[in-house]
Amino acid sequence: MIELVAAMNGYNNGEIARSQRQLAEALGTTNFRAIGKGIAELMEHGFIDVTAEGQWKARQAREYRITFVSTKTASATNDYRTWVKREKSCADTASAECRVAAQAASSPARKLDEAALARIAANRRKTAKLAD
């Protein structure tokens, strides 16, 4: 999060382009899995949003928007305020003390609120437009 905020110059919120490699170099690590998990967690908690998907062949990184920062064209959405902690399923913990049917553990039902579904749909529309 700190690296994304540091990349913001006050006018580029929504156009903060950083690849996992750039973030790893800034943090002094080569653990891309941890970088990916961190980005996914920030997105899940509502701190950042993807405004444009990266294109590997075109060498373009994803572009992010920090949800708690207002800009000249858009106000802060503060998506992190609506985040609700979800309970871990047995598939997440993978412990012997949690015994459930394999079907139930492998496919837990995910319930998303309407705001999350709207963000996902909007992101899919944006990436479809970029692909055209």
Image (cartoon, helix red, strand yellow):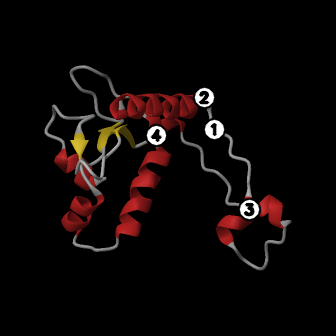
- Residue with the most extreme bottom position: 96
Disc 1 + disc 2, Cβ < 8 Å: yes
**CA–CA distance between discs 3 and 2?**
24 Å
The crowd level at tag 4 (other Cα within 10 Å; few <14, some 14-19, many 20+) is: some
**What residue does disc 2 label?**
114
Percent position (x, y) of residue 55? 30, 47
Q: Which residue is mark 3?
A: 106
Q: Count the numbered circles shown.
A: 4
Q: Which residue is mark 4?
A: 80
Q: Amino acid at mark 4?
A: Tyr
Which of the two discs, 1 and 3, labels the residue nearer the N terminus? 3
User: Which SS class for mark 3?
Assistant: helix
User: Residue at image x 18%, y 34%?
Assistant: 12
Residue at x 24%, y 51% (from the top left corner): 18
* Distance CA(mark 1)–CA(mark 3): 18 Å
Q: Secondary structure at mark 1?
A: loop
At mark 2, the secondary structure is helix
Q: Position of residue 41 (x, y in %)?
A: 46, 54
Residue farthest to the top?
A: 73
**Nearer the observer, disc 4 or disc 1?**
1
* Sequence-wise first label, 4 or 1: 4
Q: Quadrant of residue 31?
A: bottom left
Residue found at the far left of this picture? 9
Residue 8, position as x, y percentages in the image: 18, 42
User: Residue 3: which numbered mark, if any?
Assistant: none
Kind of residue at disc 2: Glu
Give the residue type at disc 3.
Answer: Ser
> Which one is earlier in the sequence, the residue at label 4 or at label 2?
4
How many other residues sit within 10 Å of disc 3, few (<14), some (14-19) or many (≥20)?
Answer: few
Q: Is 33 on the left-hand or right-hand side of 82?
A: left
Residue ID for mark 1: 112
